[in-house]
Image: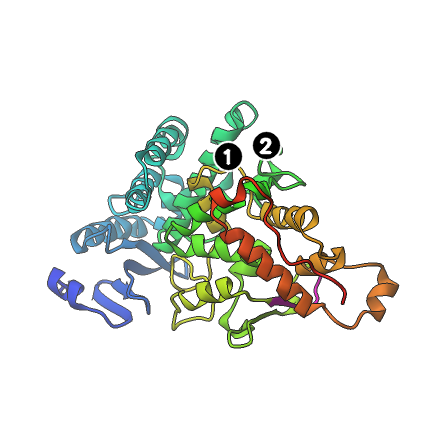
Amino acid sequence: MPAEKLNARKVDALKAPGRYGDGRNLYLQITPGGGKSWALLYTINGRSRQMGLGPLEFVSLSEARDAAIEARKLIRKGIDPLEAKRVGVASPAVLTFEQVAEQTLRSHEAKWTSTRSATQWKASMRDYVYPHIGSRPVDAIVTNDIYALLEPIWATKKETARRVRARIEQVLDAATALELRQGPNPARLRGNLKHLLPSDGKRVQKHHTALSYADLAGFMTNLRGRVGVAARALEFTILTAARTSETIGARWSEFDLEAGVWAIPAVRMKARRDHRVPLTPAALALLKALPQAPSHDFVFIGQSKTGGLSGGGMERVLDRMDVAVTVHGFRSTFRDWAAETTAYPGDVVEMALAHAVGNAVEAAYRRGDLFEKRRRLMEDWATYCAIAPKAKTGNVVTLRAGTDG
């Protein structure tokens, strides 16, 4: 038997990205971002396979060796350990959903300003999730598992069910970031559960739940006090009246910070037309304070450090803030504010939202995008977002009116 090549001290000292062998096809993998995880390479039925055994943060060298031994026993019997893991009980080095959920909770508790969020989080997991999937391997959970636990409470406990689903999605996103599972998140509503579960009348509906513009400044004060890339992404989305997909897909190459312009290419726009967004001083300050990743061009960095923020990142910020609105609903907040408190023409506001303006004939004759008028509109919007809550009571705040002149 080949001698084992690694020891605890060497594992801790290794920093350079790459794959380091321990013998018998067990490897320590180090990503460009510094993440360390275990993998077993093997061949069965003529197929080369790689089995992840978990990150070093959770799985020690000795535990990885034990898991590799158990996997080799199955291979000798002609059983693919990856397939066995999907239908069986987790091996000692394979983390269960509950283990990952508890770790996710611990990582977030320090960021919460009160114990109420943690208490609610724990209770919902204990009562609705752990009895169903708590002991399951985190990489073996599929959409049907999530549907089975949500369906009994989806119609009768709408808000609880919505929160439970969001928290499961958060845990599984964390598992993916830790390289404990692969593929799409089965708890994601769009593209998965929305085809199985009826609308809950709150988050999944045609008209997205929006915050009243009268409550916006207080909300923004709360949001700016929160840390994290997802919170900054949500703040940026509100300041620019952008769609979720436009924000999470934003690349630094789309921005001219000196000119204060965000040029979104047509391929990323719903209307499939290039769209320029004027950047206010508040939006520019937010962008300049963001960290940048050397490995990619995404503006808002995801948990894995190898890609952009996930689609549910900003929704989870709202969930933690205990605000029953959607990210998309802030576009309605912006539209209501502009219509009811300013004199900007409707086509300026609609262009700020990247909506089609007028009929096809009118569009054909319109050459410009009203950019400078939209810049003034967005500056007034940013000013309104920054007004202290107490300043909004009493007299109406007068903002610059947009005109065609």
124 over 354 or under it: above or below: above
Give residue 210's position: percent from left, percent from top: 60, 41
Q: Residue at x 78, y 59 (%)?
A: 357
Q: Is residue 263 above or below residue 84?
A: below
Query: Which residue is rendered at x = 51% and y = 77% of the image?
Result: 258
Residue at the (85%, 59%) spot, across then down: 359
22 and 263: which is toward the camera: 263
Image coordinates of residue 342 in percent, x first then y, are 67, 52
Residue closer to the observer: 272 or 173: 272
Residue 276 is left or right of residue 292, and the answer is: right
Q: How far apart are the two marked residues, 2 and 1, measured between alpha carbons?
A: 8 Å
Badge 1 crowding class, 10 Å Cα cut-off, few under 14, some 14 to 19, many 20 or more, is: some
Q: Secondary structure at mark 2?
A: loop
Please indicate whether residue 75 sits to the left or right of residue 172 in the image: left
Q: Is residue 343 visible?
A: yes
- Residue bearing the label numbered 2: 200
Q: Which residues are magenta?
A: 271-277
Q: Position of residue 397 (x, y in %)?
A: 59, 49
Q: Residue 275 lies in magenta, yes or no?
A: yes
Q: Position of residue 79 (x, y in %)?
A: 36, 48
Mark 2 neighbour class, 10 Å CA radius: few under 14, some 14 to 19, many 20 or more: some
Horizontal side, residue 387 vs residue 171: left or right = right
Mark 2–mark 1 CB contact (< 8 Å): yes
Name which residue type carries label 2. Asp
Q: Is 214 colored magenta in this rendering? A: no
Residue ranking furthest to the right: 361
Q: What amino acid type should be assigned to the residue bearing mark 1?
A: Arg
Say which residue label 1 marks. 162
Which is more N-terminal, label 1 or label 2?
A: 1
